[in-house]
Image (tube, coloured by chain):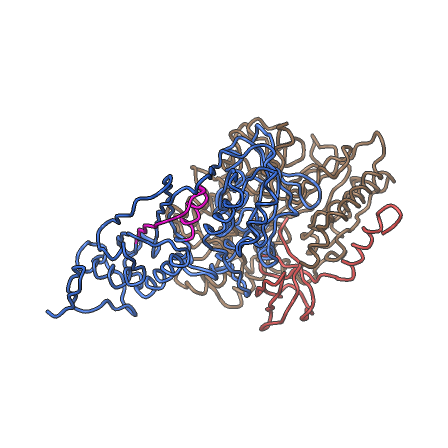
Chain colours: A red, B brown, C blue
Amino acid sequence: MCLAVPVRVVELRGAEGAVVDLGGVRKEISLALVDGVRAGDYVILHVGYALQKLDTVQAERTLELMRGLAPGGA
Amino acid sequence: MKYIDEFRDGDLARTVAQAIGRAVRPGRDYRFMEFCGGHTHAISRYGLADLLPEAVRMIHGPGCPVCVLPIGRIDQAIAIARDHGAILCTYADTLRVPASNGLSLLKAKARGADVRMVYSTLDVLAIARAHPGREVVFLAIGFETTTPPTAVAVRQAAAEGLANFTILCNHVLTPAAMHAILAAPAGVALDGFVGPAHVSTVIGSAPYEPFPRDYGKPVVIAGFEPIDVLRAIHLLVQQVNEGRSVVENEFTRAVTREGNARAQAMVDEVFTLRPSFDWRGLGAVPASALMLRPAFARFDAERRFAVPYAPVADHKACECAAILRGEKRPRECRIFGTVCSPETPVGSCMVSSEGACAAHYTYGRFREAA
Amino acid sequence: MKGDRQGGGRADYLRPIDQKAGRIDMAHGAGGRAMAQLIHEVFAAELGNEFLDQGDDGARLPPLAGRLVISTDSHVVSPLFFPGGDIGSLSVHGTVNDVAMMGARPLYLAAGFILEEGFEISVLRRIVASMARAAREAGVPVVTGDTKVVEAGKGDGIFITTTGVGAVIEGADCSGRNARPGDAVLLSGTIGDHGMAILSRRENLSFETDIVSDSAALHGMVASLLALVPSVRALRDATRGGLASTLNEIATQSGVGIHVEEAAIAVQDAVAAACEFLGLDPLHVANEGKLVAIVPAAQAERALEALRAHPLGRRAARIGTVVEDSHRFVQMTTRMGGRRIVDWLTGEQLPRIC
């Protein structure tokens, strides 16, 4: 449940804040719930907080796996 | 939008849907519950039923925190705003839920109660700081995804000594609700679950392991996008075919077995289990909801304000209870689409846009109108 | 008492209104000298034209050729100023568009203002200046108006009601009742721009990238369209409630169904992203410079050419077809290939967390 979006961290701000970008729209959010986030990382954003880092390698892998479902391969 | 658009690609959706079509065995039916309201919404909003083979039936579960919030809890929030003059802060989702005496938070606001919509608990803290002379109460709703942000706010309030900040705690737990569904005597026949996306980023995949183990029902955790949901259904069909029953994770880009330990620790520091909690539609469910620990009890609105909880029964004709448990479909409710509609919701399933009835009415009612 | 006596019978004033720091008070709506002064020094100073300058309570217009059309709209937008416009320009564009959607040429506007006691006159001046600019650019003058003042707390700063009169363009017959099965459904551009521009300025929902409102006068584009395709069945500008509500209005009025393709409906990246942040559906987000045109299928290409030739219609596209449907559903084939209903907006559009 719980609407959350994957966003890219543009820059860190203050002790626990960050500015993130989605499709060119930027917002300031809190990183209080995740460790070790750096600019360029992707995070899952929910109600103004990053909940988890997005594993971009896994994201690509998931897509590749699904493309491979086509009969005869991708 | 990166990591969104790719998971909404029409061609890839068809590829996965066709794989599901090839996987279903002739003469076999598959019934899966998507627990999470967000998945219900995705299925309806993208018309995924049209891509699934007839043999696969999706049953909508109770994972909609607004839908399962008892009317009596909203009455408490309204009372706090109206009778105690507090600033009542809430996520927008609860504003239109019909409560007692023909009121809702939005209607109470129209009658002068100071009800404010917030996007984040960060906003609530800002309001509390800006109005030190007023009581500021946060209506805290949501499953495990939404609880950590409340925990952060409570810890922050404690650190700052914000004396005018309290929360009305309605945070609920996913595995407990899943148990309630599976253990129900009249139980609905289910072959497996599509597990929640974002709840799982926080709690990890481990908490679902009892379900395959104790009930023999597979769980596949699915991401939020339509293609994630299709892929999860594909994996469920395969498990059923092969007689397997395990927890699988389709949402590997955001979910690990352990989840977010830091968020879990914060929640654990601030909250503890309530012995029991009233769920709209499910009734009293043990160990299914949270309350503040003694160390943070001063932030509990139920302690600060005299607003006793009084349970309120649902409309007699309302079938939400059966629908939330997956026993009935929206169209099997007598008042669906007539007395009860998104404009005039009677039951909880119609109130939130991801409730089974609202989703069906808003996106899918053409299916029976033919 | 000194005062300039010019032609037109203006009264003497003691001193000009303080337009930098002055505020509206009850006297400005009372019908006396203060009100006359406000009208002269703020409203007429910006909006001045031959009709307004007569100084009467109404405007005597030249005889109109053609069938008369009249439309009215009230504007209560908050915030008053947003990227791409303000309540002033909005009030001009909105009514100009309503008249144009009747297949008519907008000719004159009337404007009523309700001001809250305490409203800053400098802000009022900015709004009126913006209205004047919008009216000039549209070629539709504000020929008469009215001002009232309500006590502090009884109004949200400023409310504006504009009424427009126009004349039906020769040969045009546009009505929401005219859509027929088989007709093409055209959309003049991207959706959701205005609503998200507004939300981006409101408290609690702030973004760092400006999304600009599409507020614009569409009558020029409508005239070009009707010149090339006189058989346009219906025109409707998609405003509050978004494209979804517009399509449902037409379907209901004409007693038909509408099928659209999600892939054909254009949404700017920033608007799509802003909607994602808030859990909003662009189909329900307000527009102020886009129209839906229902045209006979055989004329669809020509109509698109006419729209695309105009600066406000560059991204015009065919988004669907009118069909027979006793239920009057608006259905959409999603990007996934599945089907779903595009329903009316329920209540007020609110962001969601779930």
Observer-nearest of C52 and A31 = C52
| Identity of the residue drawn at 64% across and 27% down | B370
- In this picture, residue C174 sits left or right of residue B288: left
Q: Quadrant of residue C27?
A: bottom left
Residue C224 sits above or below residue C177 on the image: below
- In this picture, residue C218 sits left or right of residue C322: left
* Residue at the left extreme, as displayed: C1
**Image location (x, y in percent) of residue B344:** 49, 35
**Image location (x, y in percent) of residue C347:** 48, 42
| Identity of the residue drawn at 59% across and 34% down | B320
Residue C257 sits above or below residue A74 on the image: above
**Image location (x, y in percent) of residue B253:** 75, 57
Q: Which residues are magenta?
A: C93-114
Observer-nearest of B224 and C128 = C128
Observer-nearest of C168 and B276 = C168
**Image location (x, y in percent) of residue C260:** 62, 41
Observer-nearest of B325 and C143 = C143
* Residue at the right extreme, as displayed: A72
- In this picture, residue C2 sits left or right of residue C255: left
